[in-house]
Amino acid sequence: MAPEARASPRLLLRAALLLLAALLPVASSAGPPEKEVPNKPLRMRVRASDDRLSVAWKAPRLSGAKSPRRSRGFLLGYGESGRKMNYVPLTRDERSHEIKKL
């Protein structure tokens, strides 16, 4: 049986909340605030194991270097509920992240 199939219900709940939180655009203090929110990431995948989640995604459409909707980065949100969320800032070039010690 695949490791993903043996994941605990709690870990799967975290994975589901991770998908709901998705990747939120980050406002950087290095420049002016972004006026437009970038498109959502494409083909987001989450793989769960006993103590970690692996998340991977493709860049959103219209995110080229000259696009007005290119973001400076994202916030990856995960947690057990909307009140108990953790956020990890990611650069605009990152396409995967591993969340450990769940």
Image (spheres, rainbow, N blue to C red):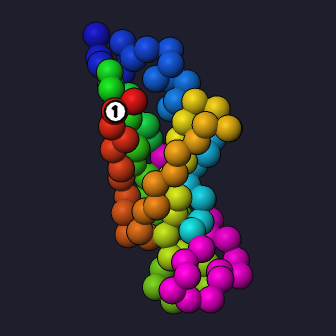
The vertical placement of 88 against 12, above or below, is below
Quarter of image, res 40:
bottom right
Q: Which amino acid does label 1 sit on?
A: Lys
Instruction: Return the residue at label 1.
Output: 101
Q: Which residue lies furthest to the front in this view?
A: 84
Q: Is residue 96 left or right of residue 84?
A: left
Of the 4 image quadrants, the one containing the N terminus is top left
Question: Image point 33% across, 37% down: which residue?
Answer: 100
The vertical placement of 98 against 67, above or below, is above
| Residue toward you, 67 or 81 | 81
Quarter of image, res 52:
top left
Instruction: Report crowding for label 1: few under 14, some 14 to 19, many 20 or more residues within 10 A (C-alpha).
Output: few
Query: In what element is the residue under mark 1?
Result: loop
Residue 90 sits inside the magenta stretch: no
Relative image position of residue 59 (x, y in whole percent): 46, 63
Question: Image point 51% across, 86% down: which residue?
Answer: 30
Relative image position of residue 98 (x, y in whole percent): 33, 44
Is residue 19 in sight in this rendering? no
Quarter of image, res 31:
bottom right
Is residue 55 in sight in this rendering? yes
**Which stretch did the figure color magenta?**
27-44
The vertical placement of 93 against 32, above or below, is above
Majority secondary structure of magenta residues: loop
Q: Is residue 92 left or right of residue 34?
A: left
Q: In this view, does 72 lie to the left or right of 94?
A: right
Relative image position of residue 41 (x, y in whole percent): 53, 57
| Residue toward you, 5 or 9 | 9
Of the 4 image quadrants, the one containing the C terminus is top left
Question: Image point 37% across, 63% down: which residue?
Answer: 94
